């Protein structure tokens, strides 16, 4: 799964290419915060059948990483399953 959060389609680099990826077992879930709510527990549960089954690679600002880490931990994901790249 790739949850890709941006303000709008204009801000989403490679959006068209990500939509057309031919990668097996790949699900692209774009989120445009200008017109939709941000990534949250409900959105993750709606798209991922078993949150505890996967590893998570979070990339973004410190605030985004803190928020997403909290959501994942609250849903039973272990901290060892969460990897981060902080863009500050």
Image: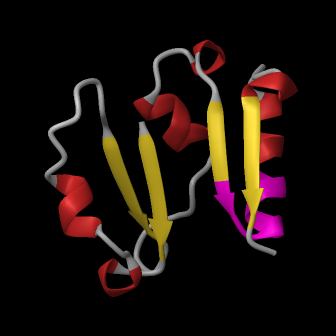
At a point 81% along the width and 75% down the height, the residue shown is 88
Q: How many marks?
A: 0
Q: Is residue 85 above or below residue 88?
A: above
Q: Quadrant of the N terminus?
A: top left
Residue at x 57% of width, y 54% of height? 39
Q: Measured from the top left, where is residue 54 in percent x and y?
A: 59, 20
Residue positioned 45% across, 58% down in the render: 4
Indicate the position of residue 53 as horizontal and vertical percent values: 59, 13
Q: Is residue 14 left or right of residue 66?
A: left
Q: Predominant secondary structure in magenta?
A: helix
Span highlighted in magenta in the image: 59-67
The question of residue 65 being in magenta is answered with yes
Residue 25 on image: x %, y %: 28, 24
Q: Nearer the viewer, residue 64 or 59?
A: 59
Identified at 40% across, 84% down, the residue is 11
Q: Residue furthest bottom?
A: 10
Classify residue 82 by image quadrant: top right
Query: Is 10 above or below relative to 24?
Result: below
């Amino acid at each position: 799964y790739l949850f890709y959060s941006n303000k709008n389609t204009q801000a989403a680099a490679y959006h068209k290419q990500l939509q057309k990826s031919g990668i097996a077992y790949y699900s692209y879930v774009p989120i445009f915060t200008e017109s939709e709510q941000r990534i949250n527990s409900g959105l993750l549960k709606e798209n991922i059948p078993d949150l505890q089954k996967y590893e998570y690679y979070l990339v973004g600002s410190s605030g985004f990483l803190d928020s997403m880490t909290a959501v994942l931990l609250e849903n039973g994901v272990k901290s060892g399953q969460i990897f981060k790249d902080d863009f500050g």
